[in-house]
Amino acid sequence: MILKGVFVGIFMAAAMTSAFAPQKALIMPRTTDSYFEGTVPTSLHMVTGTTKNTKNTSTYPTQRGSEVDPRKIVAGGTGKDNLIAIRLKHILFASEELANQSLSSLRSAQMNFDELAMQISNCAETREEGGEIGWVNMKQDNQHLDLILPETARSEVLATSIKPGDIVLTSSERGYHLVQITDVMVDVRKMSYVKTRKSYQEGQEETETQLKGILGGALAASEQEGVDFKVDLTYKVETMGCQMNIADSERMEGQLQSLGLRPYDDETDKAKGKKPDMVVLNTCSIRDHAEQKVYSYIGPYAKRKREGEDVTIIVAGCVAQQEGAALLRRAPEVDLVMGPQFANRLGDLLEDVANGNQVVATEASHIMEDSTKPRRQSTVAAWVNVIYGCNERCTYCIVPTTRGVEQSRPVESIVQEVTELVAQGYKEVTLLGQNIDAYGRDMIPKRKFSDLLRTVGSIPGLKRLRFVTSHPRYMSMGVVDAVAETPTACLNFHIPPQSGSNEILEAMGRGHTRERFLQIVDRIRQKIPDAAITADMIVGFPGETEEQFQDTLKLMEEVKFDSVNTAAYSPRPNTPAAEWENQVPDEVKQDRLQRINRLNLLHAAERRARMMGREVEVLIEERNVKVPTQVMGRTTHGYIVYCDGDIDELRGKLANVKIDVCQTYYLAGTMTEVI
Ligand code: SAM
Ligand code: SF4
């Protein structure tokens, strides 16, 4: 097949030769030795659920609190059948004691692996490159690496771990090696289901798709003489849902562009009568009938396909993961169904699609680092994933089944990504994780989010660091301290309690009480009085009584959140709460939603009112779309601020603004100084 291996080739080559950029040493004090510095109050275990009919009849793969080891359930499990290659770095020591000492400074992020390798590794071959060994091919003997990391040591590493971020201590005739697994390449062809389209069965001619033309490039064109491949292929990405999906879409777009496609321009392309050649629908299934939205969105594209047009239809994200091959049955025009864990492998998955097949990629997978550059929406503020997936089991939530188990990215990869962003001119970074305090608990050795926060926060040139989401069960007081002590860390905590009623929290399986939540709020207010606290709340959870709903309103009164994302409970497939009989009627949910929203608006206005007359530092991001002579930026709290100014001069600058208008969801004022 013409294209066989082209994409794996493209990405292997890019990934394997990607410039190695060692980072500066980042020496940070540690706060405490324990991993979860926050204590969960014992009262948690004394809460007795009064919610009726809350039996868990659903079949989650794991329950919260049970051991979830990504090494055992992804990338073909222990069999490692799906692995193509594993990327390694090492530091060579003369003594085991020194190796162990270094391991403990790496664990606390006091030292960066690359920098440590450059400073103290005894391996002359790799020292200059921060210990980089490169890719170890799982299907070959890799003898060429024997002089660096002898075979016995390599085997020991592979027997211990294949998970990016892990550091393994091993020995050989050369001495003691600290070996870090920095990336893993899985064979997406083995991990995806490829369905031959009817028009492309044995004996019939291969389908000549435009995609094949552009992706095969010169090779395909030369072998298919007379075939006029269109090279100006456009794509359109539609993103639904949370920041995770936005970040995934940015990475998928980066891959499409590196393959030669360009974004469809709604104005100019449309004016020329051109339609998008590819559509990527990145879906969200957190609420509502998400699947229905997918079918109605892809409807026009499917029609074009049925009429014989060469258009590629991709459904990505959580609905894709949830529905899998069922999507192909209901929408046979779809070419690729891919779960969130494959966002970095879109280019590879397109190989089979380019040959006219349908592909479903939803197996649990290690998440490979992306070797292409994301196409980010903003030039000022960027999203950076630090931990994928979620090991929690909130009884209403579909995320653990759609995004899989927790997989933390190596500190060094995160630091490298942020350093590159700063070099490109980005001023603000938001670290992303469903339960960000879980960062590093899946790693060997374990890491702490507070250490990561300090390390990333001290990257030279970075002006602002944000992070979402903090789970009240795991939110550590060490993180509050880290924010207080890291000048770049923004004064904004997003900590969703979801409900103010202990009975409902118990039924939700949140693992925290309202008392624990208030304890965190107290700590923040004591340590950082000006910090903004934002949240998510669900109303109308099964069995929620008026009194329990009132508890939520009371919690809001006590805390006075800067803003709350509110939602009426929506039953999701394969979640326990969806099967309970005590569902709250829709009209009650809607009534509660309106009442909570009214209170939310009052508090949002009250919180912003305290800014009147203050001079605040604002990072200018964009033009005010409603008043083009004004710019829009944000304070450290995350409040939107408008003021007069020229966006072309001010984008990405920090400015002081004297506030003279305080509205519910924005502030306005006069710029006094550009910093
Ligand atoms: N990991 C975050 C946490 O624990 O708070 C939340 C992530 S979830 C993608 C975002 C929000 O969606 C949740 O905080 C919750 O308020 C809301 N949500 C999730 N499942 C829901 C459901 N079944 N019905 C209504 N809202 C839901
Ligand atoms: Fe995980 Fe958040 Fe969903 Fe709970 S609400 S299961 S913590 S993603």
Image (cartoon, grey):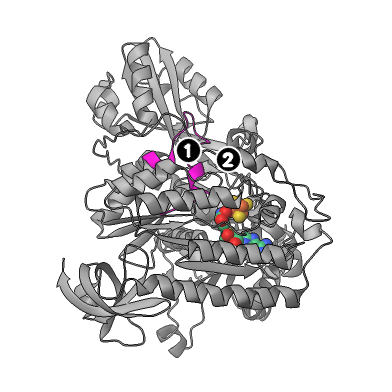
Q: Which residue is mark 1?
A: 440
Q: Is residue 349 left or right of residue 324?
A: left
Residue 670 image offset from top left, x and y in percent: 21, 79
Q: Amino acid at mark 2?
A: Pro
Task: Decide which of 571, 333 is in the foreground and name it.
Answer: 571
Seen at 62% across and 78% down, the residue is 594
Q: Secondary structure at mark 2?
A: loop
Residue 100 image offset from top left, x and y in percent: 38, 18
Question: Does the magenta segment cover residue 443?
Answer: yes
Seen at 59% across and 37% down, the residue is 70
For disc 2, the neighbor class at 10 Å (few under 14, some 14 to 19, many from 20) is: some
Specify whether residue 576 is in view. yes
Q: Which residue is mark 2?
A: 41
Q: Name the image quarter holding residue 614.
A: bottom left
Query: In the image, which disc is placed on residue 256?
Result: none
Q: Which quadrant: the C terminus?
A: bottom left
Q: Name the image quarter holding residue 174.
A: top left
Is the stretch drawn in magenta largely helix, strand or loop?
loop
| Above or below 422: residue 290 | below
Magenta-highlighted residues: 431-451
Task: Please tell me whether mark 1 or mark 2 is closer to you in this view.
Answer: 2
Q: Spatial distance from mark 1 to mark 2, Cα to Cα?
A: 23 Å
